[in-house]
Amino acid sequence: MERKIKNPILPGFYPDPSICKANGEFYLVCSSFELYPGIPVFRSRDLAHWVQIGNVMTKDNGFHVKANTFTGGVMAPTIRYYDETFYIINTNYSDKGNYIVTSKNPAGPWSEPHWLDDVPGIDASLFIDDDGSAYVLGTGNVVERADGSMDRGIWIAEFDLKEMKLAGEPKAIWDSALRNAASPEAPHVYHKDGWYYLVIAEGGTEHYHSVTVARSRDVKGWYEGFPGNPVMTHRHLGYGCEIANAGHADLVETDEGNWYAVMLASRTIGGYYKNLGRETYICPVIWERDWPVFSPGTGKLEWEYDADENLPWMEVSKENQKSLDSGVTDEWCFWGTPYGDFWKAEDKSVSLRCLPRQINEPLKCLLDESENGRRDDCVSFIGHRVTGVDYRFSCRMNFSPEEGESAGIVLLQASNHQYRLEKVRKGESEVLQVVLSTCKMDVPPHFPGFTSETKEKILAEIPWFSADAELAAEVSEQDFSFYYVRAGRKFPIFEHADGRLINPEIVGCMTGMLAGIFASGNGTDSTNTAVFTDVVYEDK
């Protein structure tokens, strides 16, 4: 049997991957932004097949994340293993910033956060040297120029693993490979053959994204850039490339001394559109003249690589169909921490109460701490990451709406961009309608002075007439169609909606799509409940 590692190794919205090795197995974590539970954890023995074994952040260890733009919350975790303990350092924009959690078992439970009040900036990373010395790296305006101005760069500081705080002052160690590069970030350090290697991302996390590397004999630098930088990018391939945004890498070494890099990248769909968001990819790495070579022979991410013959092959059946029949399992998620009792899963059904919050609530600035801390503003929503270019999402729903209430299925992108197939009341009638929601922003939501305007357009409306009807959304690349199905017959409600209207190139965000179910009182706190059965996400 031909054994291949096929990219993306984690399809769908799984960005900013970090990887470590422990006891002959590999563990990988990703950003989850405003989704709950936070930080999914995957395990593999062969680097080709990955199985989710849990989530790091839950209400059990005090996890709070606020639903807002979909692009806030938790991002860029780093996972490391040392002395029989797993460490994850991360940032939560909905809470107190940078923190570390620990566990003896990567499947959990994980500790409550050790908040790092003295660790500034974003993309904090943890490095533990061979002698047990620990360091935290981060990103900030730390590089002084000749005119006295400060540029963004990478810093390092000694760290006390017992006290969970910095044990030294942050020191700038590198700026970037490209002169005045945009967004040097995502630093990771590795110790190999007497050199300390610093791997970072540059260019921003979109088209100009890249991986660059520098080295030093001293972990505290200054670091010397590789003359061959960047070691990975797809920005030179143009806008017709099938894989874009390659960057934000983390390295791992197998027991046999083979090296690999995981990183984020995005599939383009029907043109330069990246509806699935940033996914997790992998490539082999070799070392030549004390520098790393990513994806040797081509220098770009390939759709597949030969599997490492020294690693035990995992036989994992591919499940194209995911259902809520067994409850809200690991791959399903909420938008924001689900406080209260607005949902219930039992007897192969899921109930959602019509909470006051709309599924496309007006957006708030991510710098607004009073909004970030709210626990009384939940979204009545459960969804699944969209993992395929062609897919179907469907359910049956028992729901009798009062005036102003709505429930149904939603194809959700960031910043209030979504398609919905929902049931509402209009006068004496119950109707099904397909709605397109879009949003206009003057500045990004993490900028001061952020404002936005959300608009809705009803694309189609039909009378509701059958309690046993199945609601369905079917997607083929950028072609979105909505149906109801009764007695095996499919009836169109609205066909050929344009998926490009809600893709990240339009939205301007770092996330991907979710397909889910929702219920809302749209401003009214209601006791009314929508009961969903046969909720299925399926890649075609």
Image (spheres, rainbow, N blue to C red):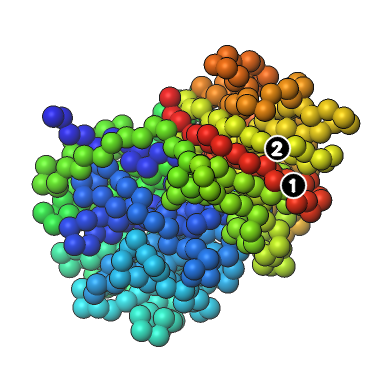
Residue 405 appears left or right of 261: right
What's the amino acid at mark 2? Phe
> Looking at numbered disc 1 in the image, what kind of residue is underneath it?
Asn
Q: Could you say whether the residue bearing mark 2 is in a helix, strand or loop?
A: loop
Q: Which residue is mark 1?
A: 528
What residue is rendered at 19% in x and 62% in y?
A: 23
Rendered location of residue 524, percent (x, y): 81, 51
In this view of the protein, can residue 117 be seen by the observer? yes
In the image, taking residue 109 as reference, residue 535 lies left or right, namely right
Residue 110 lies, with reference to residue 227, above or below; the image says: below
Tell me the number on the disc at residue 399. Answer: 2
Apparent side of residue 115 relative to residue 1 in the rendered image (left or right): right
Q: What residue is at 37 percent from the left and 65 percent from the top? A: 108
**Considering the image in quadrants, where does the N terminus appear?**
top left
**Which numbered disc, 1 or 2, marks the residue that appears first in the sequence?**
2
Q: Locate residue 202, reporting x and y percent.
A: 44, 51
Q: Which residue is depicted at the point 24% across and 59% down? A: 21
User: Farthest front residue?
Assistant: 347
Helix, strand, or loop for circle 1?
loop
